[in-house]
Image (spheres, rainbow, N blue to C red):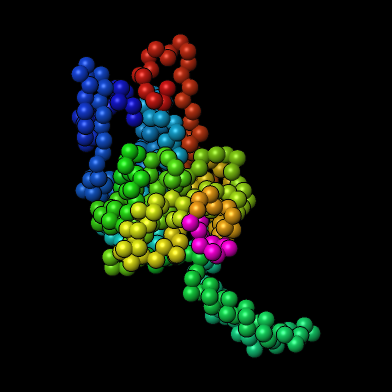
Amino acid sequence: ISPTSWYVPSLVACHMGTALSISEDRMSMVVTYPSEPVLAVGAKFFMKDQENIGRMISALQEFLSYGAVDKGYKGELIVRLLMTLAMDKAMGSTEVKEVRLKDYLVHFNRNGADVSKLIEGLESSGCEDFDVEEELKKLKRLNLDWPDSRAMLEEKLEEKKRNRASPPLMYADGRVCFTHFVYLSKSTQGELITHDLLRYAYRRSAAIVVEEGPRGIDKVIPLRVEEDKFVGLVVQHKNRASDTLQSLTRADNPATHHKVNVEYFLTEAEKETFRSAGVDLERNWPAILFAVGVDKVGAEVATQLEQKRFRHNNLSNTDRFDFPCIILTGLDYSKLMTADAAARLKDLRDFEFVPSLQKREDIPITYGS
């Protein structure tokens, strides 16, 4: 929100905002919301009422209508709301607790977009049901039994076992727990996504918003994988109506491939903090992309990336990287909100602030205008 917007003083006076500085003429005020777990828990209980969610979405649109909020943040606000509602559903309505990553992600299930099936497919390599002798019998019945059939089937079984040892969806049983979002500073973010930061954020039940910049990711959700080891659920959001599942799953799409790989968005100094904590960075972090600008509901997983697609150095000698980026399109999250709230969310997404020429002098000077 612009420091010169007439909304800003009311944030401090009525909505628990913290004033950092005020200009000498008192026309400009810089306000922030630091991490406040107690306030976040209060908001969690407020958002149990679906009518409150609808009113909250309408209030956001009203802010946009006055140019009080930069329209570029619409997609971010929508995704933060969706992720918070899914976390509240996973936790239950009466307490704040950590939940398994897989139990959190399934709350994004929708008709025509079954995330739970995607997770099951990523977790299983299929070697449990693969029997070489049974497969040979099937080939014989089809007159397809060749001299090297057994060797080929045994090699296939070994490949499945290797995939089982290193499945694409890493850390599905890791724990997530957040009630609010905090911002990663633009000026110091070069050395901030560290193991200590994720541990600290997790203990405050906070998720991290990454400011726009060279990292190419939008959010990192702390994920506890062992007693004192943390990685992150990487989140991106796009508000383009032209996106499709087909284009987003392609190996040359940077948003769902190299940008969500730790080799790309972590600096060498940051990676060292995870290695010092005993975290294996060869295991890629899970990722999710919300394509909120797309109307068609869908879900898919983008995996397998050739080495040449990366735009940085210091890569290993392997030819391919298998890691998941779950892609969700559309805004029909009927399990998270009522149909009325979902309709208001679409209105918020599609809203454009264009003041008429004769009334522009009545609009406060803001970033959004």
* Vertical position of residue 254 compared to residue 33: above or below: below
Outermost right residue: 143
- Residue 201 image point, x, y percent: 28, 53
* Vertical position of residue 194 compared to residue 7: above or below: below
Q: Is residue 325 left or right of residue 27?
A: right
Query: In front here: 311 or 242?
Result: 311
* Vertical position of residue 137 compared to residue 344: above or below: below
Q: Answer with the quarter of the image where residue 8 lies.
A: top left
Residue at 53%, 72% in the rendered image:
163
Magenta: main secondary structure equals loop
Outermost front residue: 314
Q: Which residues are magenta?
A: 314-325
Q: Answer with the quarter of the image where residue 173 lies.
A: bottom left
Q: Is residue 300 left or right of residue 30?
A: right
| Residue 179 can be seen in this image | no
Query: In front here: 317 or 219?
Result: 317
- Residue 53 image point, x, y percent: 36, 42
Q: Is residue 155 left or right of residue 366?
A: right
| Residue 253 can be seen in this image | yes
Asked whether 360 falls inside the magenta stretch, the response is no
> How many labels were placed on the picture?
0
Residue at 42%, 39% in the rendered image:
212
**Which quadrant is the N terminus positioned in?**
top left
Query: In front here: 366 or 356?
Result: 366
- Residue 162 image point, x, y percent: 53, 75
**Which quadrant is the C terminus positioned in?**
top left
Query: In front here: 97 or 58?
Result: 97
- Residue 295 image point, x, y percent: 56, 43
Residue at 56%, 43% in the rendered image:
294
Q: Answer with the quarter of the image where residue 67 lies.
A: top left
Residue at 45%, 39% in the rendered image:
75
